[in-house]
Amino acid sequence: MTAGRLCVIGDPVGHSLSPLLHRAMIAQTGAPYTYELHPVSAAALPEFVAAAKDGAWAGCNVTMPHKQTILPLLDEVDGFAADCGAVNTVCFRDGRAVGYNTDGVGLVDSLRCRGFDPAGRTVLLLGAGGAASAVCCALARAGASHIFVAARRPEAARTLSALCPDRVEAVPFDGATLRRTLAESTLLINATPLGMDGKPPFPELSFLRAAPREAVVYDLVYQPRRTALLASAAACGLVTVPGTSLLLYQAVRAFTLFTGAPVNVPALSRAVERQLG
């Protein structure tokens, strides 16, 4: 097998923009790698990891539903990924699988490049899955003063809040609570699949009217690129950030882990925007 084979795994995975991003970085840097879409079911995940450790793959990005279930299959997990309990990047070297998480730091990178520093901010985070865990831990490390976590699975929100109980608070996922907590927040992040193509929409978005005028609304969903959440937030006069921004910055960090090659991020962003139209 070719040592430079990279891929993204998930189920489903056909919607992923990771091949577009990583192939653009390969073209920019000349790194001797290829990048593929590789659907992997939950049942096939152990077999995939074993084959990769035997040399089938040099690395992989990990998307739903494997970000947490892949953890026991790895030989080593980076400290940040272990803290948030989710992996989105795996490097296979010398017969070992090492897991990392670039989602959280990628989100912080993408905010800071827009002049928004999470330090001292109050955040409302929707969702408590793998992406939400990484985002929550990264925001706490970046100095966010308080993070409300609202999830449709209350037990998952409580589990996430336990990672950093001094500044993370689990709250109900209902209209009244979302309005109350958003009124105290200057950053709203949607880390649920609500609004994604093929998934249910938000039941209602009137809670956005409670947001402070300086609030930023960030939707991690990127299919469609302009979600109903972002459209409604823009109609309220709020600054919006699409999920493609996180995708770009987490991919740059993952690519550097895979290859060691430095990436020109502004040039990459322009190239990707041209391809996406």
Image: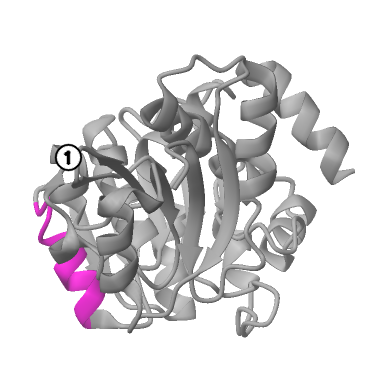
Q: Nearer the viewer, residue 263 or 97?
A: 97
Q: Is residue 42 left or right of residue 26?
A: left
Residue at 33% across, 84% down: 43
Q: Position of residue 117 (x, y in %)?
A: 43, 25
Q: Position of residue 203 (x, y in %)?
A: 61, 85
Give the dominant element type of the magenta stretch: helix, strand or loop. Answer: helix
> Residue placed farthest to the front in the image?
1
Question: Is residue 158 one of those drawn in magenta?
Answer: yes
How far across and how far down the image is residue 179, in percent? 48, 67
- How dense is the environment of label 1, judged by Cα within 10 Å: few (below 14), some, or many (20 and up)? few
Please determine whether, in this image, residue 234 is positioned above or below residue 26.
Answer: below
Per the image, the residue denoted by label 1 is 78
User: Does the image show residue 87?
Assistant: yes
Q: Residue at x 69, y 44 (%)?
A: 20
Q: Residue at x 85, y 40 (%)?
A: 275
Q: Given the current orientation, which residue lies at the most extreme right position?
A: 277
Name the residue rendered at 40%, 49% in the picture: 57
Image quarter in which the C terminus is found: top right
The magenta stretch is 155-165
How many numbered tags mark residues here? 1
**Residue 124 versus residue 80: which sits nearer the camera?**
80
- What's the colour scheme? one colour
Residue 52, placed above or below residue 101 = below
Left/right of residue 100 with respect to residue 31 in the rendered view: left
